Amino acid sequence: MTFAFTLCADDFALSPAVTAGILEALAAGRLSATCAMTTRPGWPEAARAFRDQADNADLGLHFNLTLGGPLGAMPRFAPSGAFPAMNAIVPAAWRGALPLEEIRDELRRQLDAFEQAHGSGPDFVDGHQHVQGLPGIAETLLAELSARGLAGKCWLRDSADRPKRIFSRGKHWGKALTVAGLARGFRAKARAAGFALNDGFSGFSDFDAGADYGADFASYLLAPGARQLVMCHPGHIDAELARLDPVTASREKELAFLLSPRFAEVTDLAGARLARLDAPRAA
């Protein structure tokens, strides 16, 4: 018995080297989605490069509030011009203390940048470090996407999964449960607003370049949901990446696995096949 899963490479356009690695994996047919950081200066060029893969993979907005800086002024949220860390955003979200008008305006800028470079709206929307599910941010996101007429046209990432599935995979369950807790209620709100979502989510990692990523990947395919979504973070390394993000060497490791014969061996053994996760299908 086989099942379909969507494999999404996060952080498209983060840096030229990350973009190049993701494009390699797309060209090899080893991804079915990628999500773009439109706050990064390389986004327009990355959007042009993606066009050759547009028939084979979904392209989404990776809504960014934690890496680098915003596209416009955010005097309360990012007074220095740099985004705050996730560990500052989470407690503020749960206290209801986020400046949601500023976040809405930045979301609009990121969506506009996506449309200007890509020529159309995103196939899906998720969030860097899973910010899309946080209280206040979730409602702001759903309201703006609905106002743009995107309900039923783009799908959303539910970063949560059922505890039974998480424990069945046997790895990285601490991270998975933490993120599921932060995203609590997002699925119900999104469905009530008319959006399709994935059913099942995996891909959590310690980003340890010395670990066996192939073994981790095999665990991601255990206990799949009806619309399983797996995230990954492949790419090459350059100075821009090293300056912005602590996740570096593990990206090369993930890319090497995706491009290797072992990827097909792992997916075949699991009975898994790559597929796009299209919004019109019932969630």
Image (cartoon, helix red, strand yellow):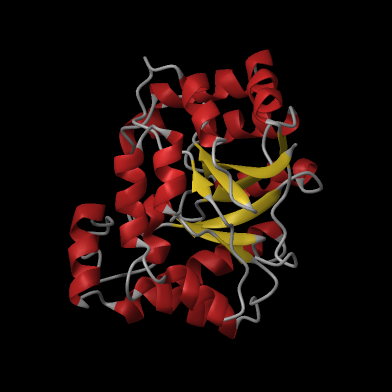
* Residue situated furthest right in the rendering: 55
Q: Nearer the viewer, residue 146 or 69?
A: 146
Q: Locate residue 163, reporting x and y percent.
A: 39, 51
Residue 189, relative to residue 33: is it above or below? below
Work out whether residue 69 or residue 222 is closer to the camera in this orientation and state it.
Answer: 222
Looking at the image, the residue that sits furthest to the bottom is 147
Residue occupying image coordinates x 55% and y 61%: 125
The part of the image, by quadrant, that contains residue 259 is: top right
Quarter of the image where one finds residue 7 = top right
The answer to whether 179 is drawn above or below residue 259 in the figure is: below
- Quarter of the image with the N terminus is top right
Q: Is residue 60 visible?
A: yes
Residue 76 drawn at (x, y percent) = 21, 72
Relative to 117, say whether 32 is above or below: above
At a point 48% along the width and 69% down the height, the residue shown is 187
Specify the quadrant of the image occupied by residue 155.
bottom right
Q: Quadrant of the C terminus?
A: bottom right
From the viewer's side, name the closer residue of 149 and 135. Answer: 135
> In screen coordinates, is 187 left or right of 84?
right
